[in-house]
Image (cartoon, rainbow, N blue to C red):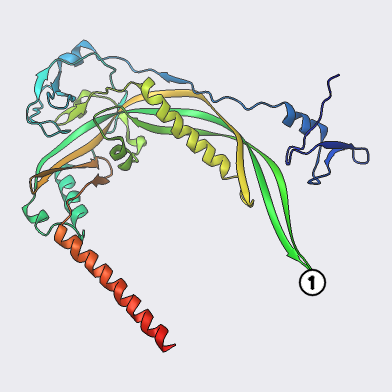
Amino acid sequence: MHVTEYKCPCCGAALKFGAEDQQMRCEYCENTFTLEAVQACQTSEPEQDTFDWSTGSAGWSQEEQEAMRAFHCPSCGGELLTEATTAATFCPYCGSPAILPGRVSESFRPDRIIPFQLRREEAQEAFLRFCTGKRLLPKHFLTSQRLEQVTGMYVPFWIFDCGVEARARYRATRVSHWADSRYSYTRTDHFLLQRGGGLQCRGVPVDGSQKMDNTWMEAIEPYDYTQAVPFDMAYLSGYLADQYDVSSEACQPIANARVRATAEAMLAGTTPGFATVVPESKSVQVHGGQVQYMLLPVWVLHATYDGRSYTFMMNGQTGKLVGELPISRGRSWAWFGAVCGGVTAAATLAGLLFRLL
């Protein structure tokens, strides 16, 4: 004979039906539940994550292919697109001067583009401001360094838009303490929390270039996608454009992870006031997913110092800049000595005060 036993959703102990209030009662944690709520908890299975994306990008027309030129770098394999009148003399990725012209390969045509908002001179000025005030920067870096290459290029991105429905179940506890003249007491209440909600995710970017460092691309975000316009060849005049070599399908796991993290953080934010909150199950369903192929503006700056090359990336719309600066060994040792000297002096002073006391 099959026996059905109902478990408390909060603590897992056996439930008993209370005739006085017509509800299921847990004698261990003293919580009460309606029969419908208990049955829902007993029979509900965690939903599986679902992600549905649609890409509508088209290919280049014959006229556009004839009006464009492709450059291939034999050193790093980079492939760049530009208007036929734009001269490419070096690779913005590795700095190689050997760029070989070739035909435009078959690929998706960008849906939209964010035009450059910063001129070359503004990018150079922003770089100087970025270097100013850095204590460990070599003394002669700003006076002797040369920005050998300042290149404006459009980096390929897949932009994901979608609607999201998310649900989660948490095990939570709330602890209270009190005391009387003889004893101290601690009470732990257990709760089963169920949360759900929906949101719209707009403009989730994923870099479509293997050669571009994803960490750097994420560091110069965000972009204002309200300034994106339909793609036109004229925007490439005087700039380079990287061709994507990572498909939208290959980028979907990264977009899924970003969407999932956003949805789960939204649900977790609805569980304040508990001592502990442990997720038991979570599910995310993406619907109406759309993918756009978009070109985003980036200034690539190359500088050399003491025989080493340094590369910096700047958001061509906002001016946000990232990169690794050289460090002066003499200044770093002087700074380290000053810090250690300060700590030693503080310790000596503390020792003297201890003796006086």
- The residue lying toward the viewer, choosing from 124 and 304, is 304
Residue 189 makes an appearance in the image: yes
Position in image of residue 327 (x %, y %): 18, 54
Relative side of 63 to 52, left or right: left
Q: Is residue 143 above or below residue 323?
A: below
- Residue lying at 71% horizontally and 61% vertically, measured from the top left: 177
- The residue lying toward the viewer, choosing from 14 and 176, is 14
Location of the C terminus by quadrant is bottom left
Position in image of residue 275 (x %, y %): 63, 52
Please, what secondary structure does the residue beneath circle 1 have? loop
Few, some or many C-alpha atoms within 10 Å of disc 1 (few <14, some 14-19, many ≥20)?
Answer: few
Q: Is residue 74 above or below residue 144?
A: above
Position in image of residue 292 (x %, y %): 36, 24
- Residue lying at 32% horizontally and 32% vertically, measured from the top left: 228
The quadrant holding residue 314 is top left
- The residue lying toward the viewer, choosing from 252 and 126, is 252
Q: Is residue 11 above or below residue 235?
A: below
Residue 271 makes an appearance in the image: no
The quadrant holding residue 155 is top left
Q: Amino acid at mark 1?
A: Ser
Q: Is residue 286 above or below residue 169?
A: above
- Residue lying at 28% horizontally and 73% vertically, measured from the top left: 342
Location of the N terminus by quadrant is top right
- Residue lying at 16% horizontally and 53% vertically, measured from the top left: 128
The quadrant holding residue 319 is top left
* The furthest residue to the bottom: 356
* The furthest residue to the top: 62
In the rendered image, which residue does mark 1 sit on? 181
Position in image of residue 291 (x %, y %): 40, 24
Numbered marks: total: 1
* The furthest residue to the right: 20
